[in-house]
Every structure is written in structure tokens, then in C-alpha cells.
Image (tube, grey):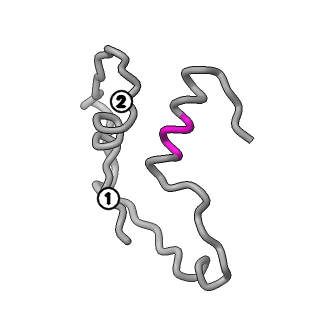
Amino acid sequence: KELAETVEDIVYSDVRKDGRKCKIVWDSSKPNGTPRKLCDVTRLNALGWKAKVAVVEGVKIAYDDFLHGDVRK
């Protein structure tokens, strides 16, 4: 399965669902790097590794920890 999410997709569709009224400012003076970064985890999967948390869910967890000062273990 290919990850088709961008940072902008995550911010606007998932992170902002918390109902906060905030202004999101994108700093266009900063380089945005490679438009798309994909990692091949075929070898990891062959060794039995599997991600415990999807990227979008991981961002939500990190954002929630940031807002509430929680440390998730």
C-alpha cells in the first residue's frame, strides 16, 4: 500500500479535527525537500517487522502529546 498522504493533508484533514481555531502558516522560504519520500520496507517485512502505528496515527499521537504534555509509552 502506498502512502499518499502529504504533511498538508495530515494537518488539514486529521490534526485540525480537534476543533481548535488556529491559523496554519506555511513558511515558503524554507526548502521543502524532495516532493515525495518513500522507504522500501520489503526486507524488514521479510524479517517479520510490521509498523505498529500508521504514519497518520503517529502524527496524531505526537500532536496530542504536544498539546497535553503526555508521554506515551
Under circle 2, the secondary element is helix
Tell me which secondary structure the magenta stretch mostly adopts: helix
Q: CA distance from mark 1 to mark 2?
A: 25 Å
Instruction: Pinpoint residue 33: horizontal percent, then vertical percent.
Output: 34, 49
Under circle 1, the secondary element is loop
Q: Residues within 10 Å of mark 2 (few under 14, many from 20)?
A: few
Instruction: Give the residue displayed 71% in from the left and 31% down from the top.
Output: 71
Q: Quadrant of residue 13?
A: top left
Q: What type is the residue that disc 2 sits on?
A: Lys
Residue with the mark numbered 1: 36
Q: Is residue 39 left or right of residue 3?
A: right
Instruction: Give the residue displayed 49% in from the left and 47% down from the top.
Output: 57
Instruction: Pinpoint residue 48: horizontal percent, then vertical percent.
Output: 66, 79
Q: Quadrant of the N terminus?
A: bottom left
Which residue occupies the foreground of this view, 41 or 53? Answer: 53
| Relative vertical location of residue 6 with respect to residue 30 in this rendering, above or below | below
Q: Quadrant of the C terminus?
A: top right
Instruction: Give the residue displayed 34% in from the left and 35% down from the top.
Output: 11
Instruction: Give the residue displayed 60% in from the left and 70% down from the top.
Output: 50
Instruction: Pinpoint residue 12: horizontal percent, then vertical percent.
Output: 29, 34
Earlier residue among tags 1 and 2: 2
Front tag of 1 and 2 = 2
Q: What type is the residue that disc 1 sits on?
A: Arg
Magenta stretch holds residue 8: no
Q: Quadrant of residue 21?
A: top left
| Residue furthest to the right | 73
Q: Which residues are magenta?
A: 58-62
Say if mark 1 contacts mark 2, CB within 8 Å: no
Instruction: Specify the label residue 48 is tagged with.
Output: none
| Relative vertical location of residue 29 with respect to residue 20 in this rendering, above or below | below
Which residue occupies the foreground of this view, 62 or 34? Answer: 62
Instruction: Specify the label residue 17 is tagged with.
Output: 2
